[in-house]
Image (spheres, grey):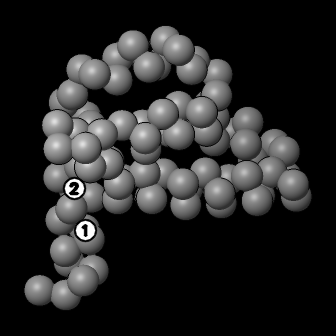
Amino acid sequence: MTKSDQFRDTVCTEWLLYATGTALDSAVDQFPYNICTYWLHVSNMVDTVGEKKYKNLSYIAKAALTLSHSNAIASPELIVSISKLS
C-alpha cells in the first residue's frame, strides 16, 4: 500500500465520520455565509484522545478553498458560480 492509498483511505474514513456526524449541525448555523470560518472550526475539532478529528479532510478542504480564492482575483464570477453549486 502506497502513501497515496493510505491518505485516500484516511480521507474516506474522515469523510464518512464527517458526513454521518451530528456534532457539526450547530456549526452550520454559526457560520452560514463564511465557508473559510466553518472549515477552520471543523479543522480545529478534536476527538476523545485530543487528536485533530478531521486532519486530512481539512487538508483537502483548505486546498480546495485556496484554489477558489486564488481564482477569485482573476475571476470573481467564478466564486459566485462555485458558491451556487454548494
Residue 53 in view in this figure: no
Instruction: Report the residue at 22% width, 39% height from top.
Output: 47
Please name the amino acid that badge 2 sits on.
Answer: Cys
Q: Choose between 83 and 41: the one closer to the eye.
A: 41
- The residues tagged by marks 2 and 1 sit, at their Cα atoms, a distance apart of 6 Å
Where is residue 35 drawn, in percent x and y?
Answer: 59, 33
**Left or right relative to 8: residue 60:** right
Q: Secondary structure at mark 1?
A: helix
Quarter occupied by the N terminus: bottom left
Q: Would you place residue 67 above or below residue 76 in this image?
A: below
Where is residue 13 drawn, in percent x and y?
Answer: 17, 52
The image quarter containing residue 19 is top left
How many marks the image carries: the answer is 2
Residue 74 in view in this figure: yes
Instruction: Report the residue at 17% width, 37% height from top.
Output: 48
Residue furthest front in the image: 50
The image quarter containing residue 49 is top left
**Left or right relative to 73: residue 4:** left
Q: Which mark is residue 8?
A: 1
Q: Would you place residue 42 above or below residue 52 in this image?
A: above
Q: Which mark is residue 51?
A: none
Q: Secondary structure at mark 2?
A: helix
Q: Which mark is residue 12?
A: 2
Q: Are marks 2 and 1 in contact (CB under 8 Å)?
A: yes
Instruction: Report the residue at 76% width, 59% height from top.
Output: 70
**Label 1 Cα neighbours within 10 Å, binned few <14 / some 14-19 / many ≥20:** some
The image quarter containing residue 62 is bottom right
Instruction: Report the residue at 45% width, 59% height from top.
Output: 59
Please name the amino acid that badge 1 sits on.
Answer: Arg
Where is residue 5 drawn, in percent x and y?
Answer: 20, 77
Where is residue 55 drawn, in percent x and y?
Answer: 35, 54
